[in-house]
Amino acid sequence: MKRYGIMGGTFDPIHVAHLMIAEYAKDEYELDKIIFIPTGTPPHKNECTDSKIRYDMVSLAVEDNVDFEVTDIETNRTELSYSVDTINELKGKYSGSFYFIIGSDTLFQLKTWKKIGELSKNVEFICAVRPEYISTKALEMELLYLKSKYNTKINIIKSPLYELSSTYIRERIQTGKSVKYLLPDKVIKYIEEHKLYRGLS
């Protein structure tokens, strides 16, 4: 049975930490494929760049890795995008088991997700954490709560990755600072050609 890693996010823009976490999770859990899913209209974020643009950037970022692929399953939706609906749809297209890759910030939001109990029946989570940024006790308590209430299976990987966010990258672009080595070169070129993130307030 194939093992699929699911990497969802706004990817506004996608950056090297996203790619490194995906690669790290793939190796640690022997995943056959990582499926990147740019969100359409995400329920937890009010404003983001047009979904077609974000999809294009992810496509460019992953096109040279045979173990990575991108799907427009959420960007084609006109309504709000929820992970439980996405996984149900993916189950009809892919035969195998699913591993949802998240960061520690998302871990503490899981209990607010739509139908997290149903989602927990269909996926295991892989959570990348940096121990120096999160209390061990807080992490253990959250894992226990999710397991006891929703039977959520969460695997922890201690990620050696540095702190990097799309917000930080957008701010650097807005102020004319370099983002070289923070994004794949193809994504940087796309951003420059489309003059993205210039008029942010």
Image (tube, rainbow, N blue to C red):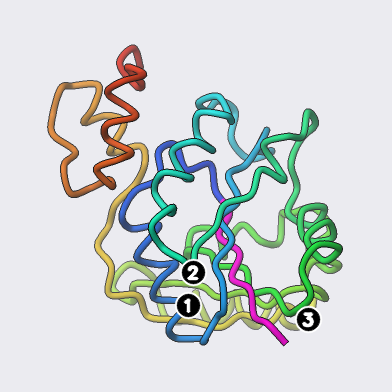
Query: Dividing the picture into quarters, in which one does residue 96 lie?
Result: bottom right
Q: Nearer the viewer, mark 3 or mark 2?
A: 2
> What residue is drawn where x is 13% and y is 29%?
177
Report which residue position mark 1 lands on.
26
Please, what is the dominant secondary structure of the magenta stretch?
strand
Q: Do the residues bearing badges 3 and 2 touch, measured as CB atoms within 8 Å?
A: no
Q: Look at the numbered disc 2 and give the secondary structure of its residue.
A: loop
Residue at the spot of label 3 = 151
Specify the segment rendered in magenta. Answer: 1-8
51 and 139: which is toward the camera: 51
Q: Residue 30: x percent and y percent? A: 51, 86
Q: Earlier in the sequence, mark 3 or mark 2?
A: 2
Counting other residues with Cα less than 10 Å from the Cα at mark 1, is it few (<14), some (14-19), or many (20 or more)? many
Using the image, determine if residue 73 lies above or below residue 152. Answer: above
Q: Which circle marks residue 118 in the picture? A: none
As measured in the structure, the alpha-carbon distance from the residue carrying label 3 to the one carrying label 2 is 29 Å
Quarter residue 94 falls in: bottom right
User: Considering only order in the chain, which callout, 3 or 1, is on the residue closer to the N terminus?
Assistant: 1
Residue at image location 63% in from the left, 73% down from the top: 4
